[in-house]
Amino acid sequence: MASFVEIGFSIDRSSFPAGSICTINYHYFLQCDAYEIDHSMGFSLWCEVWGNERLGKKMLAGALDNHTLVAATNLQQTRSFVIQCELLDDRLGEDNIYLLIKAHASNGVMVQARSPLIKEHF
């Protein structure tokens, strides 16, 4: 069964007169097993942006950067997407934002993994 071995991300902010856009740059390594590789299994992947609150977790944005991959020995990916900074603003500087990456295999199996909490201010 596939599993995420490594996930990381960073956030860059660009300010415009009409507001701010944040670019989320992320990378992951999806490790596939021999069965998935031999059968050229497909994966649908997407990201969710989450934030910690004092009383629990809150999804800030979901189903971002939808993409598909076919099982291979090395599925290391570097990708990015943009989001309105106002969705993140109340979490910034508190080490409270993380990504949840989900992969749905063509055989119906779902795997997901969480990135480390963001540690940088911008």
Image (spheres, rainbow, N blue to C red):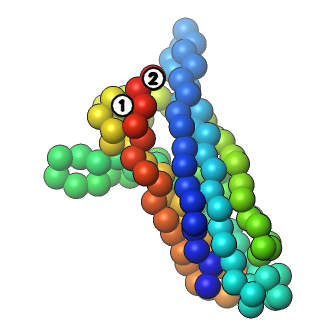
Kind of residue at badge 2: Phe
Residue at the spot 74% in from the left edge and 90% down from the top edge: 35
Q: Which mark is residue 122?
A: 2
Kind of residue at badge 1: Leu
Residue at the spot 42% in from the left edge and 31% down from the top edge: 120
Does residue 112 appear in this view? Answer: yes
Q: Marks 1 and 2, Cα distance to the nearest angstrom?
A: 8 Å
SS category of the residue bearing label 1? loop
Which quadrant: the N terminus? bottom right
| Closer to the camera in the image, 38 or 52 | 38
| Closer to the camera in the image, 34 or 93 | 34
Question: Where is 15 relative to 109, above or below?
Answer: above
Disc 1 crowd rating (10 Å Cα; few below 14, some 14-19, many 20+) is some
First-in-chain label (1 vs 2) = 1
**x and y, in percent, of residue 96 in the image:** 33, 42
Q: Which residue is mark 1?
A: 92
Residue at the spot 33% in from the left edge and 38% down from the top edge: 95
